[in-house]
Amino acid sequence: LTAHVTLDPAFRLAPVHRRTFGTFVEHLGRCVYTGLYEPGHPTADEDGFRRDVLELTRELGVTTARYPGGNFVSGYRWEDGIGPREHRPRRLDLAWHSTETNEFGLDEFVRWTRKAELEPMMAVNLGTRGIAEAVDLLEYCTIGSGTHLSDLRVANGAKEPYDIRMWCLGNEMDGHWQIGHKDAREYGRLAAATARAMRMLDPGLELVACGSSASSMPTFGAWEATVLEETYDVVDFVSCHAYYEEHDGDLAGFLASAVDMDHFIDSVVATADSVGARLKSTKKINISFDEWNVWYLSRYQNAEPPRDWPVAPRLLEDHYHLADAVTLGGLLISLLRHSDRVTSACLAQLVNVIAPIMTEPGGRAWRQTTFHPFAQASRHAAGDVLRVEVASPTHETERYGEVATLDAVATHDGESTTLFAVNRSVDRPLTLTADLRALGPVRIAEATVLSGPDPYARNTADAPDTVRPRRNDEARLDGGALELTLPPVSWNVIRLT
Ligand code: AHR
């Protein structure tokens, strides 16, 4: 099999947005407790934050963190998580059938983001709460001092206000599982009213309206149209959420999950633009793809929720294999390829819960297979995203029919060009040639491949490096052409300088 791409810096699509490499920290399972926060842990710092997790978070290269949920936010009272710990209430978390101790809250989260060197992104509760609580939270965060809530923040130890720019207006309000689930008109009106009030306090906020929880939702498309009719002038983003898993042994279909993500993004862009056209607006609504990942959701859906309201139970702790990591690489390619409209995204989630970083309570932290494509893309995607002309053979999948075997995107920052490529074939190597003449004289700075004989090979706490990128010494340049072989089920990164 042979595929061909042409890389030309003149074919610039959009800048690489650093926020594409965001993540998500929800009060769910062990993401917070015994994940990033564990006071008794040998690596814990003075705030109880695990230094081993902080280091891996920085290595992962995440740029933003969405907080505190997810489904959790729709029942959350943010005031429970501030002030002296001994006064913080224990509450039932209805979304995940757990007990929330509130030992970790907003002030801890912001302190943690500073140590992790990333931008906080907040979600407000539009499930059980509304405009007043959202504005209160904003006042607590962003006013210097001199009001009840800003003075409370100062008294809680944070003299300087929190510069939080991005705010999600609720979470997955289209989902019947969401506490306070609403229909599109009802949610759209509440989101618009909340956005208007929040903008009275700070007109420069970047606000995200909830889009669909998946492209398979029965209301997909209609939901976005109605919500944006209500909110178009007062929001900047509409969200997309998508999780992928292998269904019924269709590995080829799973590896091509980016086909769905492409369709999802294109449909939401078209819907948003059609609302804009009807409103005679020149404004464009961008996409915040603020939950995406591989998640074996069907296994979770069939499981019983915890019975006894445990604190930080092991929930949604998927152990990822090589094919999951390659699929995730394909999803990153899809996000980058849509950088003209997807300007923010969050890998859901960061630690333990469907996460690239795993921890053992009291023990080590380690990298799942999916850590690697994300870290490489965050580190090496720079400058502009290029439109890459891909000429690829195709193959059949059960889920998506005929798909291109090669998926690829490239970025270029004047000094270096990076090609990210996935071979979606389950069993056939792919010879890739790339026409580089427009780049001028270049050399291969590094070529790596994430692949292996077993697509279901995993990393574990005891063997954390079983699946990791290795050098691909076969990549070579000949005149203005690059040639290399992409093994089946592989994620490849080629850096040219
Ligand atoms: O990320 C796990 C859950 O997935 C989130 O809480 C929810 O928003 C989505 O359904």
Image (cartoon, rainbow, N blue to C red):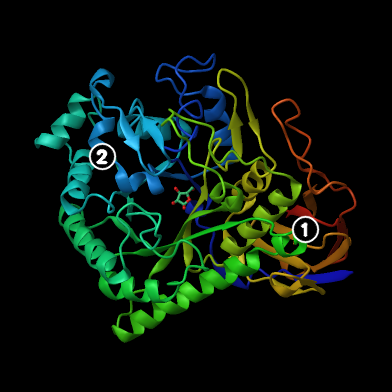
Q: Quadrant of residue 356?
A: top right
**Residue at figure coordinates x 66%, y 35% from the top left:** 367
Query: Looking at the image, which is closer to me, 243 or 313?
Result: 313
For mark 2, what is the residue? Answer: 77
**Residues marked 2 and 1 touching at CB (< 8 Å):** no
> Comparing marks 2 and 1, which lies closer to the viewer?
2
Asked if residue 413 can be seen in this view, the reply is no
| Distance from Cα at disc 2 to Cα at disc 1 | 55 Å
Q: Position of residue 203 (x, y in %)?
A: 21, 58
Q: Position of residue 131 (x, y in %)?
A: 18, 54
For mark 1, what is the residue? Answer: 442
Q: Is disc 1's CB within 8 Å of ligand 1?
A: no
Q: Position of residue 296 (x, y in %)?
A: 62, 50
Q: Position of residue 395 (x, y in %)?
A: 81, 72
Dot 2 or dot 1, earlier in sequence? 2
Answer with left or right where residue 374 lies relative to residue 214: right
Q: Quadrant of residue 460?
A: top right
Give the residue type at disc 2. Answer: Arg
